[in-house]
Amino acid sequence: MSVLQMLQERSNSTCEFCGSKDQLKQYIIPPSLNENVDNSVLACNTCLDQIEGHTDMDVNHWRCLNDSMWNEHVAVQITSWRMLQRLREEGWPKDLIDMMYLDDEAMALARATGEHEDESAKIIHRDVNGIVLETGDAVVLVKDLKVKGSSMVAKQGTAVRNIRLDHENAEYIEGKVDGQQIVIITKYVKKL
């Protein structure tokens, strides 16, 4: 059974946030690198476009978080917490955030994308051309890089898919090159 089928079964083929039954898709919560039921949610296009930032936030649409934040699945709780953080200036989300409980591991994952930080405090990762990088992006190396601690050389032109951002340093990202997870300096990559 595929992850999408398991998500459909667990949610009765409804959006795990607003309850819509139309145009449902799987969403893997960042910074997850692998696909499984524990780090994925089932969301409608309306929710997904706003979660991914493709459309402006419809504050009233997200009143559904009052219910979804209590979902038994941690991935839904984490995504609900992140959306409440984005909306916290509206007032009512602050009350929901105060009521919400996530264990330490879930809270660490929820904070991994920096949703809880003010815009001025967020660390922005940029490639060699100044383009903003996000978790899950694909980049290409712009020069040969010697990998510290090994004899491996990552060649110029190598594509690195599904990158993760270092949330403490704007110059570092992580990705797999030749099956090995490495840290890469952002000034040596270009977003694809």
Image: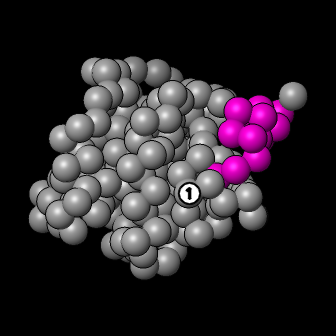
Q: Nearer the viewer, residue 70 or 128?
A: 70
In the rendered image of this protein, does residue 169 appear above or below residue 89?
A: above
User: Can you see residue 92?
Assistant: yes
Q: Position of residue 86 (x, y in %)?
A: 29, 60
Please check the rendered image and state whether residue 143 is part of the magenta-colored stretch, yes or no. no
Display coloring: one colour
Tell me the element at label 1: loop
- Quadrant into which the N terminus falls: top right
Q: Nearer the viewer, residue 143 or 32?
A: 32
Residue occupying the far bottom of the picture: 56
User: Residue at the spot x=46%, y=56% of the render?
Assistant: 64
Q: Position of residue 185 (x, y in %)?
A: 34, 48
Q: Residues in magenta?
A: 2-15
Tag 1 residue: 18
In the rendered image of this protein, does residue 25 appear above or below residue 59?
A: above
- Quadrant into which the C terminus falls: bottom right
User: Can you see residue 123?
Assistant: no
